Amino acid sequence: MEFTPHDLEDLKRARQLLENPSLAARMTGKIGLPIEKAFETLPKSWSQTVSTAVRVAMGRALDVAVMTLERQPNRPSLDLLHTVAVAATGAVGGAFGLASLPVELPISTTIMLRSIADIARSEGESLEDVKTRLACLEVFALGGRNPGDNASETGYFAVRSLLARTISEAAQFITERGLAEKGAPVLVRMIGLIANRFGLVVSQKIAAQAVPVIGAVGGGLINTVFIDHFQDIARGHFIIRRLEKVCGPEEVRRQYDLLGPAPQPGPGNGKTRGNGRH
């Protein structure tokens, strides 16, 4: 089917959300300190701590995605409620620093996954479908881009293409066998791909929280920016998926490329709380 004016407006909004400033840029704007400088405050062991915490968080998220996401009918997504919950976990992280990461990150990631699933449902996705639930996990990889990335290699469609085969294989495996074999190579490979990209933004978040003046209040603020970033990516991602079901993936990609540079959002960051459909 051809694009309608309404479809085109939705696509423009999705592109703007997907091309919003990176998490590092957003946090720099909030705390007034370049993330590169914030990295200098981290202890030498931070990298291994973050890597371990990210993989644990992704494993927990996979459990939640497959087993416990609510299958409620379409309704507006509760973005603000999830943001408040993640801000609370960020306050703990800001108060206790890197030591709290192994506890705080799996909790905040689970809350974020539920928010992402809520957005998916509000855009017409069925959480009965394993592929939809894994598409929710995919958002964590899609949000792991940096300003210096080569767009042809790490842009929205490039990352989706990189993940497509692995996620499809994982969906088939889970449909046939469930999570009885969590160590199966296809699941390990999927978690690894997502964790590698998600770890980029987690490292940026931890660096910002490690700044001595941040504290609990600043930690809550940083986690608010953190979940806002992934809510924007999720909204854009599931708008694109909705349009692909109607107009076809090739036509959506063609129209996306024809739009040119996305306009930068205003003070409100281009975000609409709740259901993004209109």
Image: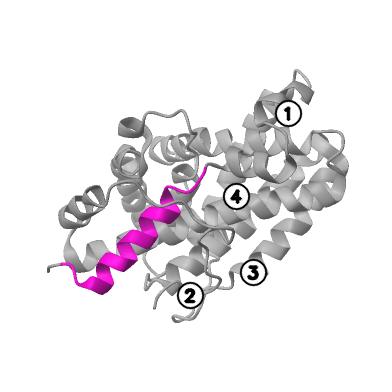
Can see residue 178?
no
Residue nearest the viewer, comparing 147 with 68: 147
> Can you name the residue that lies furthest to the top here?
44
Q: Nearer the N terminus, badge 1 or badge 3?
A: 1
Which secondary structure lies at badge 1? helix
Q: Nearer the N terminus, badge 1 or badge 4?
A: 1
Image x and y of residue 106, in percent: 67, 48
Q: Quadrant of the C terminus?
A: bottom left
Q: Quadrant of the N terminus?
A: bottom left
Which secondary structure lies at badge 3? helix
Q: Residue at x 50, y 57 (%)?
A: 232
Q: Nearer the N terminus, badge 2 or badge 3?
A: 3
Can see residue 142?
yes
Q: Residue at x 48, y 75 (%)?
A: 275
Which marked residue is nearer to the observer: mark 2 or mark 4?
2
Which marked residue is nearer to the observer: mark 1 or mark 4?
1
Q: Which residues are magenta?
A: 3-21
Q: Is residue 263 left or right of 54 when viewed as pictured? A: left
The circle on residue 80 is 3
Determine which residue is flagged by label 4: 60
Q: Nearer the N terminus, badge 3 or badge 4?
A: 4
Q: Majority secondary structure of the magenta segment?
A: helix
Q: Residue at x 56, y 44 (%)?
A: 58
Q: Give yes or no for contact between labels 1 and 3 (Cβ–Cβ under 8 Å).
A: no
Q: Which kind of residue does numbered mark 3 sit on?
A: Leu
Q: Is residue 255 magenta?
A: no
Q: Is residue 14 left or right of 39 when viewed as pictured? A: left
Determine which residue is flagged by label 1: 38
